[in-house]
């Protein structure tokens, strides 16, 4: 199964939600992570224009949300349900942290749908609701203030699900090529730059070749960390030329700077 | 350092935020993960009762938020700044995913404060703001809809920071054994270096401030990749001094180069 097929088998179930803004925020959080199946169990508010506003561009998720009369109805056909729970309960399922929970949870999508169940903003899940789930999941948080907003909790859970589905390296901006990268500079071009640099620094008086004090190794270390590109070598060589033969602000040499991209 | 001491060195910086609800949501998200230091750069809205309502019990974080006139002011004294960026930009710093970014970022708290910088809800960060940061961080997301709400983005980042702080620090650049490592340069020192560099390049004639051709962003990108250290800033500033006031090989100024290690 592809990561997206796995995510398509995840239901986000919100029980007795009080605030339409939170329903909208949950829809938006889901869509940002590629989740789309929202279930509203006995919502205590309308899915109104406040929900739509907070959903921003995720109003399709809102529009397709299933409204259910009971949690059992929302879980029908699921092979696994995990309850988000901030506190431990008597008789509730075993609680694990989000990051440990998502892998085994997604593994079960090979068999059928799985559900992540969120309680009411104030009262959380009832004991009965919690006992409909096979597992309790907690978001590690500040013990002195563990009260995540409902939409924020959905965001963290959805993020962890996406990270797990894509194996920790989801496709996206982070893995695309860095913009404006030119090709790496050739090693011999870099060496010629260092020769030029040392000559200019001796000319300005900063560097004394007879008493080098490890200046060049330090500069080499700096530029090696950066990993110089071809265009950057051209710029740096141009700067060195301009120091050796200053033209002044009125006579700027343009030959050495690479073409604009 | 304890995990909480590490988290106490993280600044959350919100630039030109438009909606008070988002500022409140950010404060709440921070507090749930044990972060407390909120900086508001040129907020476009008041921190009003809407912000307080959304902050819920995190009104202490709101009350102690620093309001700054510029991003540079908010970053003063930081040793590292990472920009949250949903899209790639020309000449911006290299972008990595959140999970890869947080470990090395927290490793730098051993030296000083670090900052995570968030842009305006609609327009994000300006290129100038982005170029004040050494790294860009993205939250892996649905390529078809990657628009996280600001509060939700702060929640995910804060969650990952807490997970990293309490989960054992992955070895980052600061903890790897690299010879000659000095402490990272402070961001305001780096900015002063860029001001000095631009002045000298105008003096030599290489740079025409009236026709900048993206020279400075290109140089910022190069040095941001390297991650400048305090000693290196001293060397580079010394080189710039020697270009402005050349002493020649016989009169080498030694005052500016740092002591040998």
Image (cartoon, coloured by chain):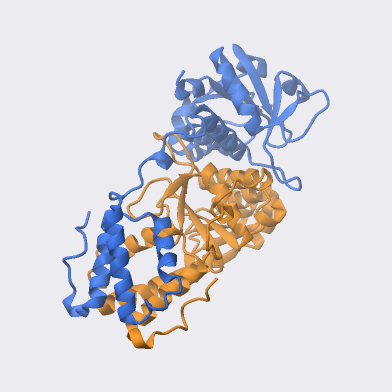
Chain colours: A blue, B orange
Q: Residue at x 76, y 20 (%)?
A: A128
Quarter-wise, where is residue A175 in the image?
Answer: top left
When the figure is inspected, residue A122 is found, relative to residue B1, above or below; the finding is above
Q: Residue at x 52, y 68 (%)?
A: B186
User: In this orientation, which residue lies closer to the viewer: A33 or A24?
Assistant: A33
Q: Position of residue A108 (x, y in %)?
A: 59, 17
When the figure is inspected, residue A132 is found, relative to residue B133, above or below; the finding is above
Q: Position of residue B201 (x, y in %)?
A: 29, 74
Q: How many marks?
A: 0
Q: Residue at x 43, y 65 (%)?
A: A217
Q: Is residue A132 rendered to the left or right of residue B78?
A: right
Q: Is residue A66 visible?
A: yes
User: In this orientation, which residue lies closer to the viewer: B257 or B193?
Assistant: B257
User: In this orientation, which residue lies closer to the viewer: A129 or B94?
Assistant: B94
Q: Residue at x 64, y 49 (%)?
A: B28
User: In this orientation, which residue lies closer to the viewer: B93 or B61?
Assistant: B93
């Amino acid at each position: 199964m592809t990561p997206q097929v796995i995510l398509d088998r995840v239901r986000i179930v919100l029980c007795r939600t009080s605030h339409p803004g939170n329903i909208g925020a949950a829809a938006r959080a889901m869509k940002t992570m590629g989740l789309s199946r929202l279930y509203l169990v006995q919502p205590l508010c309308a899915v109104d224009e406040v929900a739509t506003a907070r959903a921003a561009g995720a109003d399709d998720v809102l529009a397709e949300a299933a409204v259910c009369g009971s949690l059992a109805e929302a879980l029908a056909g699921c092979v696994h349900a995990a309850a988000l729970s901030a506190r431990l309960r008597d008789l509730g399922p075993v609680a694990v942290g989000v990051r440990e929970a998502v892998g085994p949870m997604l593994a079960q999508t090979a068999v059928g749908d799985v559900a992540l169940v969120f309680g009411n903003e104030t009262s959380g899940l009832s004991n009965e609701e919690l006992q409909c789930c096979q597992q309790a999941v907690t978001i590690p948080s500040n013990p002195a203030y563990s009260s995540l907003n409902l939409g924020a909790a959905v965001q963290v859970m959805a993020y962890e699900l996406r990270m797990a589905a894509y194996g920790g390296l989801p496709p996206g901006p982070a893995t695309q090529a860095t913009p404006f990268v030119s090709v790496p500079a050739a090693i011999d071009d870099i060496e010629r730059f260092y020769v030029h640099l040392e000559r200019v620094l001796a000319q300005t008086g900063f560097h004394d070749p007879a008493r080098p004090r490890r200046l060049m190794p330090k500069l080499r270390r700096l530029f090696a960390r950066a990993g110089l590109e071809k265009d950057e070598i051209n710029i740096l060589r141009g700067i060195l030329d301009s120091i050796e033969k200053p033209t002044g602000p009125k006579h700027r040499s343009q030959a050495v700077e690479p073409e604009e991209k």
